[in-house]
């Protein structure tokens, strides 16, 4: 068994299973996580360039220190020539990075449910056709708009807790499996609830146990290939009276203890890479 220094954080957590090889990109990017340890993750120069795109919203760039987009996309194995689907992009935080990354060689679907969320995404894309003109905005469920088995990487960021609270998680993961091609990837980031906590909290707190997400994905047919601590935050105790929305960026309690919550930062998050068997 490989050993690491006692106080070092893993570059990428040990793989749980391997269904296909993972191509390592040529560069290493350094970042400091919430625990103060430095970790390196291989990052394609194209991803690094997309993260630095001048078209990104400054307020979104300011949150990179919590969300580590370059390292996260590298961990999921995203490349500029892939077909990528982002489920429920909402405000478009990752869309601002994925659009320029996939613009020239890839295909990028932004899949959003009908309603205000869809209208908001459409308005963002329409406002900057030079950046977003090639993004394929589709209504979720996608129906015939995206061919089954055509997606290299399907990404969902901080959405699974909404599925669980809404009661549609199993069906959504089933549709994910249908869309991803054999050998393709499902990348999940979400707020992490300690395994020792009451599962009932998943219905109200915005946090989920890793075992819950794993069970949903495996029931759909995916295999958990690897997990990473890239987006971990040990300062988050995940026991807030007003749920994960207590922390930034929501800051549900307003000015009450605002400095305390800003010092904690955004939530502790699991980062999971699932693979669809060939």
Image (tube, helix red, strand yellow):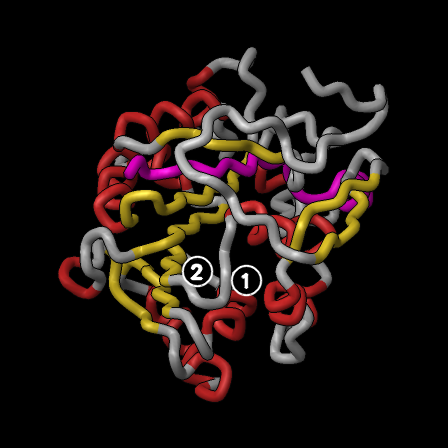
Secondary structure of residue under mark 1: loop
- Residue 27 lies, with reference to residue 174, above or below; the image says below
Q: In front: 8, or 249? A: 8
Mark 2, Cα crowd under 10 Å, few <14 / some 14-19 / many 20+, is many
Indicate the quadrant containing the C terminus: top left, top right, bottom left or bottom right.
top left
Instruction: Identify the residue position indicated by label 2 in the image.
Output: 90
- Residue 270 lies, with reference to residue 62, above or below; the image says above
Residue 257 visible to an observer of this rendering: no
Disc 1 from disc 2: Cα separation:
8 Å
Q: In front: 85, or 3? A: 3
- Taking the magenta stretch, the answer to whether it contains residue 274 is yes
Q: Is residue 181 left or right of residue 265?
A: left
Instruction: Identify the residue position indicated by label 1 in the image.
Output: 93
Secondary structure of residue under mark 2: loop
Mark 1, Cα crowd under 10 Å, few <14 / some 14-19 / many 20+, is some
Taking the spot 36% from the left edge, 34% from the top edge, the residue there is 165
Contact, CB < 8 Å: mark 1 with mark 2?
yes
> Image quarter for residue 267?
top right
> What is the magenta range?
256-278
Taking the spot 48% from the left edge, 28% from the top edge, the residue there is 208
């Amino acid at each position: 068994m490989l050993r690491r220094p006692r106080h070092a954080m893993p570059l990428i957590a040990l793989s749980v299973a391997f269904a296909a090889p993972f191509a390592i990109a040529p560069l290493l990017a350094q970042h400091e996580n919430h625990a103060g340890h430095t970790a390196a993750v291989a990052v394609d120069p194209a991803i690094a360039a997309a993260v630095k795109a001048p078209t990104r919203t400054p307020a979104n760039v300011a949150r990179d220190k919590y969300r580590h987009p370059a390292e996260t996309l590298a961990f999921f194995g995203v490349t500029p020539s892939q077909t990528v689907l982002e489920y429920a992009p909402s405000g478009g935080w990752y869309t601002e990075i994925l659009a320029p990354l996939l613009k020239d060689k890839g295909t990028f679907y932004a899949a959003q449910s009908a309603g205000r969320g869809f209208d908001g995404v459409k308005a963002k894309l329409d406002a900057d056709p030079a950046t977003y003109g090639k993004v394929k905005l589709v209504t979720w469920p996608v129906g015939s708009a995206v061919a089954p088995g055509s997606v290299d990487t399907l990404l969902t960021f901080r959405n699974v807790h909404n599925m669980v609270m809404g009661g549609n998680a199993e069906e959504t993961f089933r549709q994910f499996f249908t869309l991803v091609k054999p050998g393709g990837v499902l990348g999940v980031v979400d707020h992490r609830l300690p395994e020792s906590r009451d599962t009932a909290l998943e219905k109200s707190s915005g946090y989920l146990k890793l075992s819950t997400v794993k069970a949903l994905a495996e029931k759909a047919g995916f295999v958990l290939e690897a997990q990473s601590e890239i987006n971990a935050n040990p300062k988050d105790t995940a026991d807030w009276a007003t749920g994960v929305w207590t922390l930034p960026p929501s800051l549900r309690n307003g000015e009450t203890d605002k400095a305390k919550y800003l010092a904690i930062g955004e939530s502790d998050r699991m980062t999971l890479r699932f693979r669809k068997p060939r």
